[in-house]
Amino acid sequence: MSRRRIIAGNWKMNMRLDTATALAKGVAESVGENPEVDVVLCPPSIYLSAVGTAVEGTPVGLGAQNLYAAQDGAFTGEVNAAMLTDVGCGYVILGHSERRALLGETDQQISEKLHSALAGNLTPIVCVGETLEDRESGQTEQVVETQVRGSLAGLDAGQAASIVLASEPVWAIGTGNTATPEQAEEVHAFIRKLLGEIFSAEIAGQIRIQYGGSVKPNNATELLGQPNIDGALVGGASLKVEDFAGIIHAG
Ligand code: 13P
């Protein structure tokens, strides 16, 4: 079956309010009314409302970069799924490698967040990816498998079909060292096979797997042309309309 491509911009902790809304409007303009791919913007949470307003009435979706897996309560500084839905989010990035590495997020926490996102009707974009050390020591598949199994723990097949995975090699993020299409496809094919074992071949065939890590307009076409690469999670190149548009419109 064919999977609709999904291109998401992870703005990370960048932008100021005026540039954020201008960028969002620019992206919406470039996307037009009837894009062939799903397009999602993930600004810092403080700007979600403003960016949501900027893209209102357009096909551009809104996503958060994280959530806290609890109902309302005494969790200072945190934001939950219901709050994200309130401000117009349809998506949430979970388990980004920066959160895993800098904030010690574990697969178990990511799995709790995932269940919370699904209960709140958010489409989760679950990130996995090996470090350079993992790759050089031949551990890529083992590391990715542990992350996929741990992060998706307790998910039933029906829920699984609606999630998005993002395979982001840590060594490719923000470095300009994009994985070659062959390297990326190898990991994506492995993940899809694994999803087939965990759920079923049919469900695995429905789950979209994005590639992330130094995606640019000049390498997007080849990456997105791989059979198991269903979109991109874009950092740096999502901060400029021309660059992000170039990836969205990559043939
Ligand atoms: P870059 O595109 O800047 O490498 O970032 C990728 C990323 O981490 C997206 O989540």
Image (spheres, rainbow, N blue to C red):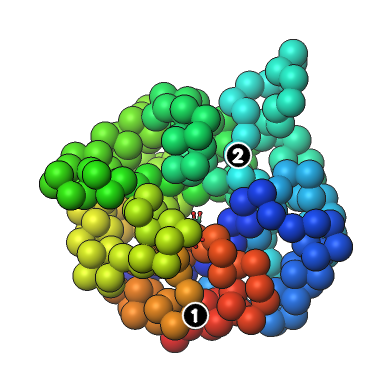
| Tag 1: amino acid | Pro
Rate crowding at label 1 as few (under 14), some (14 to 19) or many (20 or more) other CA atoms within 10 Å. Answer: some
Q: Relative to the observer, which residue lies in front, 116 or 41?
A: 41
Rate crowding at label 2 as few (under 14), some (14 to 19) or many (20 or more) other CA atoms within 10 Å. Answer: many
Q: Relative to the observer, which residue lies in front, 25 or 39?
A: 25
Q: Secondary structure at mark 2?
A: loop
Name the residue located 38 percent from the left edge and 35 percent from the top edge.
152
**Res. 161 in view:** no
Q: Distance between the Cα atoms at labels 1 and 2? A: 26 Å
Name the residue located 44 percent from the left edge and 35 percent from the top edge.
101
Give the side of residue 67 with respect to residue 153, left or right. right
Residue 193: x percent and y percent? 20, 52
Across the whole image, how many numbered discs are drawn on residues? 2
Q: Which residue lies most toward the bottom here?
A: 251
From what the image shows, is residue 243 above or below residue 131?
below
Name the residue located 86 percent from the left edge and 63 percent from the top edge.
18
**Res. 73 in view:** yes
Q: Which residue is mark 1?
A: 217
Which mark is nearer the camera, 1 or 2? Answer: 1
Give the side of residue 99 with respect to residue 68, left or right. left
Q: Which residue is mark 2?
A: 66
